[in-house]
């Protein structure tokens, strides 16, 4: 809850400063924000619905068995692969990650999923290799995947 | 609205469950409603922040600061500009490619792309809310470390490349 207060304070301050400098630009910012929000709304709603169903079906005990301590490193690697392939907007993935974490998933597995989700793009790979060349895209995505596992291990070690 | 087809399908699924497995439908519905409440609270300011930076941070400022700036200062700018809330990755690709053509280092562009993808400010705000400040801070630090290392490795492997792909201008389909 305190984070929410910080975010609102931050945005309201920025908004006031923006409005003071240029009401016109501020109006445009609202337009841009509205457009982006409307564009993300379907996927937001979809994820909310699916998360509800998933957590309704899977008990915390089952989540713990699938993504928790006893699932081991294999679950972490699987999570990393899923994160690399899927194209969920990251701001939607965080709430889901949070509740999986509270239901007994390990920090390591959740971190692996989030990190590959944002850093490795299987779907965007063709575009990336067209812009930078295959070698660059392969290296960047490959190293990001390995890096994600390293980050996951470090965070799992420190935070659990 | 074609985009809303999938969420509607899920809604229908909830409806079916309500008649077949009412307990499950209730449990799931309560969880989903709670989510919706949290999201509804946090998303408007996050999107507004994106809108504000879209309007106030000109793309050519990024161009100017990262163009030929080598060394530590360039890396710092790469990180800062990467974290600013300025749109999806498919905008960052052509931007980084054009910066490479203008003499930016591979190392700094790897940091720039990585920060753009993984360390964006709106994303960090949502992360703090749902996963906690400790998790967010630690992920920021470890990710930054990995990105800096990746930059070094990629610089090493790609430097000897005489005619890299980003030297050829490619037309990128930009969505407007």
Image: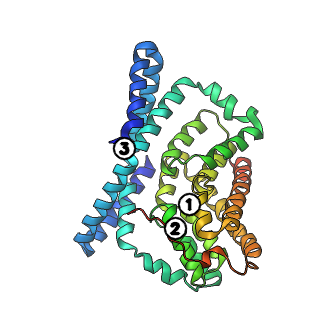
The image shows residue B175 at horizontal and vertical percentages of 41, 62
Q: Is residue B15 rendered to the left or right of residue A111?
A: left
User: Eyeballing the image, is B36 above or below B154?
Assistant: above
Secondary element type, mark 2 = helix
Residue A107 appears in the picture as rendered = no
Q: Work out whether mark 3 precedes mark 2 in sequence or the reverse, and give the earlier one.
A: 3
Residue B137 lies in quadrant: bottom right
Q: Which residue is mark 2?
A: B92
Chain bearing mark 1:
B
Q: Which residue is mark 3?
A: B40
Chain bearing mark 2:
B
**Mark 1 against mark 3, which lies toward the viewer?**
1
Residue B144 appears in the picture as rendered = yes
Q: Work out whether mark 2 precedes mark 1 in sequence or the reverse, and give the earlier one.
A: 2
The crowd level at tag 2 (other Cα within 10 Å; few <14, some 14-19, many 20+) is some
| Pointers 2 and 1 in contact (C-beta within 8 Å) | yes
Q: Which residue is mark 1?
A: B117
Q: Is residue A133 rendered to the left or right of residue A88?
A: right
User: Eyeballing the image, is B22 above or below B82?
Assistant: above
């Amino acid at each position: 809850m305190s984070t929410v207060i910080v975010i609102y304070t931050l945005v309201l301050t920025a908004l006031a400063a923006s409005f003071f400098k240029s009401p016109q630009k501020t109006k445009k910012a609202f337009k841009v924000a509205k457009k982006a929000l409307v564009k993300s709304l379907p996927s937001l709603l979809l994820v909310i619905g699916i998360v509800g169903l998933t957590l309704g079906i899977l008990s915390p005990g089952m989540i713990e068995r699938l993504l928790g301590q006893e699932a081991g490193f294999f679950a972490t690697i699987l999570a990393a692969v899923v994160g690399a392939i899927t194209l969920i907007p990251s701001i939607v993935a965080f709430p889901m990650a949070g509740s999986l974490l509270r239901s007994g998933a390990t920090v390591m597995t959740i971190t692996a999923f989030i990190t590959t989700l944002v850093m490795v793009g299987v779907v965007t790979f063709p575009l990336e290799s067209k812009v930078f060349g295959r070698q660059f895209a392969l290296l960047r995505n490959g190293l990001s995947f390995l890096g994600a596992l390293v980050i996951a291990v470090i965070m799992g070690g420190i935070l659990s | 609205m074609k985009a809303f087809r999938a969420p509607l399908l899920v809604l229908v699924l909830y409806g079916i469950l309500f008649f077949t497995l009412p307990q499950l439908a209730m449990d799931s519905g309560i969880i989903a409603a709670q989510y919706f409440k949290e999201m509804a609270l946090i998303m408007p300011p996050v999107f507004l922040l994106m809108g504000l930076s879209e309007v106030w941070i000109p793309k050519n400022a990024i161009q100017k600061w990262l163009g030929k700036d080598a060394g530590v200062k360039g890396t710092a700018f790469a990180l800062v500009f990467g974290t600013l809330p300025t749109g999806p990755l498919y905008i960052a690709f052509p931007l980084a490619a054009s910066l490479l053509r203008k003499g930016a280092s591979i190392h700094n562009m790897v940091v720039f792309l990585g920060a753009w993808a993984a360390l964006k400010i709106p994303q960090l705000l949502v992360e703090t809310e749902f996963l906690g400040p400790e998790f967010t801070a630690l992920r920021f630090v470890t990710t930054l470390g990995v990105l800096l290392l990746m930059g070094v490795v990629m610089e090493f492997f790609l430097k000897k490349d005489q005619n890299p792909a980003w030297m050829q201008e490619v037309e990128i389909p930009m969505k407007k």
